[in-house]
């Protein structure tokens, strides 16, 4: 196998990962004097903030995914390869992938983060994650299949295992997912599964800390809890999950919940990259970088986004691992590579937000916070504007409008893949 990329007289920038950071950087370097090689395991960019809506059958996967080759149709200097990074050789300026090796002049690592199970193998084996479109589709299938199984289960206790859901982690992902699940239970189940008593369906949100949305204001945290409780989510604060065996969830408070579906949203970590010195890694397995995004100790290897640990006065523990940080870092690095800027990066916090279902959201702006309907409208506008492609924005807007008017969704399909042997 080979990447089959011809030698060039242009300086080559290899970007590993087409998330918010990698894609933003590649777009900024498109039509530049560089040859840009973008490597990713998928041939599309995934809009992670809306994974949970795919899982809840509110949006179709193609509405939040955009083909990389379509993004760069008019950019002759951008080359895309679908592969996995295996290692790097910083002395030879070479990356080794599942398709072969490639020389670089500048290497940018922007693979993002993965789910952190804190070394618990049982959790890793039995809990569900939401770090990709594939994960979201798997969760959607799992929820719908379990509802079908519940229809055939007369025993109450066994039926609870199919219909009750536990979410672990009270950050934005956990809060938004809990709100969406509660709305599915309240509005969809009575229509689609009339033989099930939707009052039997319990949704648990377990948070190890004393409040939800740890990175947001006290007002937003308190309001998010109030919103969730109002729509029937059972929130367990100061509670840690100790065991997930596929049938029961057990906590440090000796509470035992029968649930086959446990969605893990309790933390993220970064992968270790073979070829980087071990002293590059710090908190959360993130890679230490300077204010020019260079990995400390290297002259032409950079890290961006969730993977990068950068200290500045306002953020002594590194920047929050959110999309805006990744995008701003990518824009700054593009200027540095083009020679248009040498100023150290400084993150500009534009605010944080989370939605808790219909007409309910919390928004923290740099100067003030607000909640409720207008916060929900702002959440919709920001996420709609952040999507790539006019078609995707139209699809999402249409689905949101339809769902809002009808209290319904039309995407509840159980799609199983079938492996076919090659002839």
Image: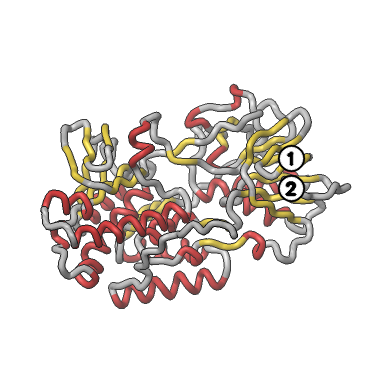
Q: Does 243 sit above or below residue 407?
A: above
- Number of numbered discs on residues: 2
Q: Does 283 sit above or below residue 156?
A: above
Residue at left offset 28%, top offset 36% = 208
Residue 64, percent across and down?
A: 49, 62
The residue sitting at the right extreme is 9
Residue at left offset 73%, top offset 53% = 29
Residue 277, percent across and down?
A: 63, 24
Residue at left offset 83%, top offset 50% = 6
Residue 226, percent across and down?
A: 22, 53
Q: Nearer the viewer, residue 337 or 87?
A: 87
Rate crowding at label 1 as few (under 14), some (14 to 19) or many (20 or more) other CA atoms within 10 Å.
many
User: Which mark sits nearer the N-terminus, 1 or 2?
Assistant: 2
The mark found on residue 3 in the picture is 2
**Quarter of the figure that contains the C terminus:** bottom right
Q: Secondary structure at mark 2?
A: loop
Residue 54, percent across and down?
A: 41, 61
Rate crowding at label 2 as few (under 14), some (14 to 19) or many (20 or more) other CA atoms within 10 Å.
some
Pointer 1 residue: 101
Q: Secondary structure at mark 1?
A: strand
Left or right: 144, with 104 as reference point: left
Q: Does 255 sit above or below residue 213?
A: above
Find out whether the residues at labels 1 and 2 contact each other: C-beta distance under 8 Å: yes
The mark found on residue 156 in the picture is none
Q: Nearer the viewer, residue 397 or 115?
A: 115
Residue 234 visible in the shown view: yes
Left or right: 29, with 285 as reference point: right
**Quarter of the figure that contains the N terminus:** top right
**Residues at marks 1 and 2, CA–CA distance in whole angstroms:** 7 Å
Left or right: 193, with 412 as reference point: left
Q: Nearer the viewer, residue 340 or 99?
A: 99
Residue at left offset 37%, top offset 44% = 265
């Amino acid at each position: 196998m080979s990447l089959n990329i011809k030698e060039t007289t242009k300086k080559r920038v290899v970007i590993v990962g087409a998330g918010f950071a990698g894609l933003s950087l590649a777009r900024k370097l498109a039509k530049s004097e560089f040859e840009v090689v973008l490597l990713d395991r998928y041939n599309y960019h995934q809009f992670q903030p809306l994974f949970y809506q795919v899982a809840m059958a509110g949006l179709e996967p193609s509405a939040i995914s955009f083909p990389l080759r379509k993004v760069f149709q008019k950019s002759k200097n951008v080359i895309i390869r679908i592969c996995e990074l295996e290692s790097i050789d910083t002395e030879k300026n070479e990356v080794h992938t599942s398709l072969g090796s490639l020389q670089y002049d500048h290497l940018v690592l922007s693979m993002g983060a993965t789910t952190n199970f804190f070394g618990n193998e049982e959790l890793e084996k039995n809990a569900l994650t939401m770090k990709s479109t594939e994960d979201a589709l798997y969760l959607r299938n799992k929820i719908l299949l379990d509802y079908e199984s519940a229809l055939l289960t007369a025993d109450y206790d066994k039926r609870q295992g199919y219909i009750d859901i536990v979410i672990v982690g009270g950050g934005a992902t956990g809060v938004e997912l809990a709100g969406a699940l509660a709305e599915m239970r309240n509005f969809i189940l009575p229509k689609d599964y009339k033989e099930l008593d939707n009052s039997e369906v319990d949704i648990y949100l377990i948070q190890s800390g004393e409040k939800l949305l740890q990175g947001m204001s006290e007002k937003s945290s308190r309001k998010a809890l109030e919103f969730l409780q109002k729509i029937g989510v059972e929130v367990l604060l100061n509670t840690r999950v100790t065991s997930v065996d596929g049938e029961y969830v057990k906590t440090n408070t000796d509470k035992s919940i029968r649930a086959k579906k446990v969605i893990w949203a309790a933390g993220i970590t970064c992968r270790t990259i073979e070829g980087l010195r071990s002293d590059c890694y710090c908190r959360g397995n993130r890679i230490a970088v300077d204010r020019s995004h260079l990995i400390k100790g290297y002259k032409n290897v950079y890290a961006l986004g969730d993977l990068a640990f950068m200290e500045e006065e306002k953020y002594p523990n590194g920047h929050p691992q959110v999309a805006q940080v990744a995008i701003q870092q990518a824009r700054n690095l593009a200027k540095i590579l083009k020679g248009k800027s040498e100023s150290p990066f400084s993150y500009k916090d534009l605010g944080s937000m989370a939605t808790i279902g219909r007409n309910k959201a919390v928004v923290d702006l740099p100067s003030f916070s607000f909640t409720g309907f207008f916060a929900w409208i702002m959440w919709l506008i920001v996420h709609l504007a952040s999507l790539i492609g006019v078609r995707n924005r139209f699809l999402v807007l249409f689905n949101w409008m339809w769902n809002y008017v009808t209290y319904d969704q039309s995407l509840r399909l159980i799609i199983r893949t079938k492996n076919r042997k090659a002839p």
